[in-house]
Amino acid sequence: MFRFIKTDIEDALKLLKDLPNIGIYIAQDNRFRFVNDEMTKITGFSREELFNMNPMDLVHPEDRERVRREAIRMLKGEKDTPYEFRALRKDGSIGWVLAKAIPVKFRGSDAVLVNFMDITRQKELEQILRKVLDLSPAGICLAERRVIKWANPEMARLFGYKDVKELEDLPARDCYASDEEYERVGKILYTVLKNGVPAQTEALFKRKDGSTFWGIIKMSTFDPEAPQKRVIAAVMDISEKKRLEEELFKEKELFEVTLMSIGDGVICTDREGRVRFINKTAQKLTGWSEEEAIGRPLREVFHIVNEFTRERCEDPVEKVLRTGKVVGLANNTVLIAKDGTERILADSGAPIKDKDGNIIGVVLVFRDVTEQRRLEREIARMERLESIGVLAGGIAHDFNNLLMGMLGNISLLKTRTSPDKSEYRYLENLERVVIQARSLSQQLLTFSRGGRPIRKPIDIADLLKKAVRFALSGADIRCDFYIQDGIWKVNGDRNLLSQVINNIVINSRQAMPSGGRITVKAENVKVEDESIPVRKGNYVKITIQDTGIGIPKEYISRLFDPYFTTKQKGSGLGLTVAYSIIKDHEGYITIDSELGKGTTVEIYLPAVLEKEEEKTLKLERLKVLVMDDEEIVLSVLKEMLNTLGHEARTASNGEEAIELYKKEKFDLVILDLTVPAGMGGQETMERLLEIDPNVRAIVSSGYSNDPIMSEYEKYGFKAVIAKPYGLEELREAIKKAIS
């Protein structure tokens, strides 16, 4: 195709006037300004006729919009390849033209120079070629820059398309099973095509419906210098060939594949019970290499005993040879490896027979079920724990109600006793005992835990000191505390975080059986980058460091895995629970250790900065409705509310509470979640919201792990308080609900 470069158009037109085979014209203001002789031959119009026409008059109406777009793109420099269109001749016939446009200056003004060739004959030959290609048994396509431009019917059928038009402008990438396969095949083909020779390779293709098939692709390029620009490709389905090859491979490898498919460990013997074959898994389990095992009696290589009696089990090969039948290994069979390692086994032995049915040997198939057996026992243990948990949850609920009566009455007595009297000191001691009892109750609830943390601002210094000292009670271990002045409060569940600290310190205690030192630090930090996987913000960083025996580096990454433990006795759940609790608090926990030097645990917990206005909020006298099924709780709670200056009415179940709320106006409602013989707090709250959408309510329960307690706002409550609680906790809950 001729490409005009000079901008001195007037001088160049003399050269272009008689240029053969290429039509040339200049258009300006949608009119022909110059046409060469070849232009009149191609169109059949004279120069005078063309000068009175718009260049678009020569374009077939169905192609005009596309030609306009292509020409504009070319003039803007966005496209450099010629475009095709159907041209209208003077005699009414239609021909095909390949055109290219460039901007020029003509007589001082902007113009467009267009050169094009009559490709009608080429198109006719192309149609003939396409008909021939349509009959091809191979899928054939033309691609430009790895985009399909034309394809024959077989190509459409191969790839699951109903019509070849669906393949037009389809990226070749969509025809491959994966992006990796697309890149792999392209690298192979185009590397070869650059050498100017056709290329071929096998590839895994993808049909329209997502199914895949194996094919062989052959490709030839029009231009070795730019192989991706335009290529012709042929694809043939070789799935059947692949299937036959795979079957042939299976036939050749049948013996080994069969043995591997029926178990992990495989040993074959002859009639005398001597080892003739042992696969790699069996070598690993027995501790005998192939060279050592071949030719030896099975009893030497396959040493099995009863797990409990430790008596040697009957040789399975001897039993198979004697009975001629498949035999299973006895329950509780333990394989003792060459190095003394013991594994629990399962599976069977079977006779190997020749074509006449004679036994010529035995194949023994077995697998290691040690982990499976351990998990089965662990699951059974966890099921027992779950049953205990249900019982523990019920006991803890009732126990918390009793503690509620005790703690509430102690709080009331303290308000009626002067702090300078000895009785006040006795009440404080008794209060501490009840709070310790509450911790024991929380440990019972740990068995039945199912909810999220009930987060409140916590004095982390107080929590750390109490939890650590409790865990180290009676131990010959020194503990040093380094708490930063002005340490922020932590937004968390006090009981759960105490459990985390308790688990970590107990691990440290067990790592120092002869005594040692634990260092506990707490400091304020701001996380402003992605150095640890938490959201940016204020955190309290807790560091617990011991001088214990340490942990091997290879175990560090598994410390939080369920059931993983480095101790002789233990469930392996302590750190898993700690990790889960810290994660539920949107915090982060990490462990570092070195053998002989000790272990360091770091915990990041979101901090909360209290607002002064919340501390100074004063409450007016409120009318409060209390619902609880325990009379002792109702009695003490009524007295506590009266002491705080509020008026209280009581109900023993949800039905009574609803009736009272309908009759009287209440500023606040306190609802117990669990009422065994009546309507509980959740359903009561739903009914109250129907009556009064603005009802203010506090949810309370002896089950502090109930999901509603951690997400109380979703259920319409304004605050939460877990039993047992004292006067100050009640005051804070009321303040939160009202404010």
Image (cartoon, rainbow, N blue to C red):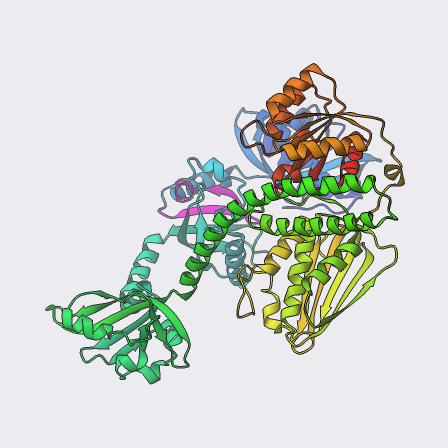
Residue drawn at the location 36% of the way across and 54% of the way down: 238
Q: Does residue 69 appear in this view?
A: no
Residue drawn at the location 42% of the way across and 46% of the way down: 211
Check if residue 428 falls in the magenta segment.
Answer: no
Residue 276 appears left or right of 435 = left
Residue 350 % position (x, y): 22, 67
Residue 278 appears left or right of 360 = right
Residue 341 % position (x, y): 42, 76
Residue 369 appears left or right of 355 = right
Residue 262 % position (x, y): 30, 63
Residues 641 and 88: in front is 641
Up/down of 374 relative to 306, above or below: above
Q: Quadrant of residue 567?
A: bottom right
Residues 697 and 528: in front is 697
Residues 719 and 242: in front is 719
Residue 270 % position (x, y): 21, 78
Check if residue 155 falls in the magenta segment.
Answer: yes
Q: Does residue 348 appear in this view?
A: yes
Up/down of 619 relative to 427, above or below: above
Residue drawn at the location 58% of the way across and 64% of the way down: 558
Up/down of 653 relative to 291, above or below: above
Residues 450 and 83: in front is 450
- Give the magenta-colored segment's residue range: 137-158
Quarter of the image that includes the C terminus: top right
Q: Residue furthest top?
A: 663
